[in-house]
Structures are given as C-alpha cells and as structure tokens.
Image (cartoon, grey):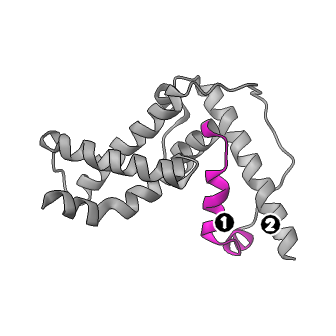
Amino acid sequence: MAEDELYRRYAVRLYKLCRRYLGNEYDARDLMLETLLRALDRINTFKYTGEGSLYAWISRIAINKALNRVRRQNWRMVSVDFSTQDNIPEPAVEELAEIPGEKLMEWISRLPDMRRAVFNLYCIEGYSHQEIGKMLGISERSSTSTLAKARKELKEKIHQYLKEQG
C-alpha cells in the first residue's frame, strides 16, 4: 500500500526533522504522523520536479505544521534585545568534532520554542531573517536577535561540555 511505502521511506527523516522543531519525542512523533497523513490526503497536489522533490514537499508540510504550532501557542519574545552580543568565542571546528551529534541535537531540542524555530530555519533550513520573520509573524530584527540568543545559549553549552571533558 502507498501508506506503508511512504512511511517506510520517510518516517525516520521526518521524525528527525520534527524533533528539531519540537521539544520532545512525543510531539515529534505526533507531528511526523500528522504530516504523513496530510501528505497522503493532498498527494494529488504534489508536482514531481525531480529526485528528492517528494521528500522536499513532505518536509515543507512538516515545517509549516511545526511553525503553526509555535504561532498557535502564542510564543512571545519577552525581551527583544537587538544588540545581543556575547563574549563567548566561537568553538573551533576541531572542538565541534569532539561533540557527539546526539548531544548537539539534544541542546537544540532544549532551546525555548521560538529560539529553536529560528535556529532551525536559519542555520539548518537556510531561510533568511526576512523569510523567517514572515513565517513566524515577527520582525526581521526579532529573528536576528532570537538567533543571536540561541547561538549564545548553544555556545555556552558547548564550552561547558568541552570544559567538563577536559
């Protein structure tokens, strides 16, 4: 059946995508299943444009659903500090290589919802701050500030981890 094949091919990648946007496994699984059901329901609107286009189409559904959850929950940025600068040095590539990928994903998943969404959209999905602002209903400057705060939080965790590892 088409449902089984779609699940077999895309469930794991979709789950990982959903986990990046949502804070816990339960919500990520729920969103992954909801996304697959929506894709099946709207498969007649899919336009094949080459290899990978089906996954790109399905992942876009997942991202939109995740962002809708963030918006629906009315997450507001409590303080908008547009001059967010930190004195934490960027970790070296060699240092980052020492950190297990699961650990980085754990830290990203623990970011506050808005920071996690902006971080994922900018750093992983490659959207501009202007595009992120439109998607989340915030200003471009708020997106920039939120990303700076997310990066600062992650850099603190990276430095603490490296310090603990010796």
Q: Mark 1–mark 2 contact, CB under 8 Å?
A: yes
- Residue 22 appears in the figure: yes
Q: CA distance from mark 1 to mark 2?
A: 10 Å
- Which of the pair 60/48 is nearer the observer? 60
The circle drawn on residue 83 is none
Q: What residue lies at 45% left-to-right and 54% top-to-bottom? A: 17
Residue 136: % across, % down: 51, 28
- Residue 124 appears in the figure: no
The circle drawn on residue 161 is 2
Relative horizontal placement of residue 31, taking residue 155 as reference (left or right): left
The magenta stretch is 93-113
> Callout 1 environment at 10 Å: few (<14), some (14 to 19), or many (20+)?
few
**Labels 1 and 2: the sequence-earlier one:** 1
> Callout 2 environment at 10 Å: few (<14), some (14 to 19), or many (20+)?
some
Relative horizontal placement of residue 44, taking residue 161 as reference (left or right): left
Q: What residue lies at 39% left-to-right and 61% top-to-bottom? A: 13
Name the dominant secondary structure of the magenta segment.
helix
Does the segment drawn in magenta span residue 164? no
Locate the N terminus by quadrant. Answer: bottom left
Residue 61: % across, % down: 33, 42
Q: What residue lies at 84% left-to-right and 52% top-to-bottom? A: 88
Label 1 SS: helix
Label 1: which residue?
Answer: 103
Residue 45: % across, % down: 15, 39
The amino acid type found where label 1 is placed reads Lys
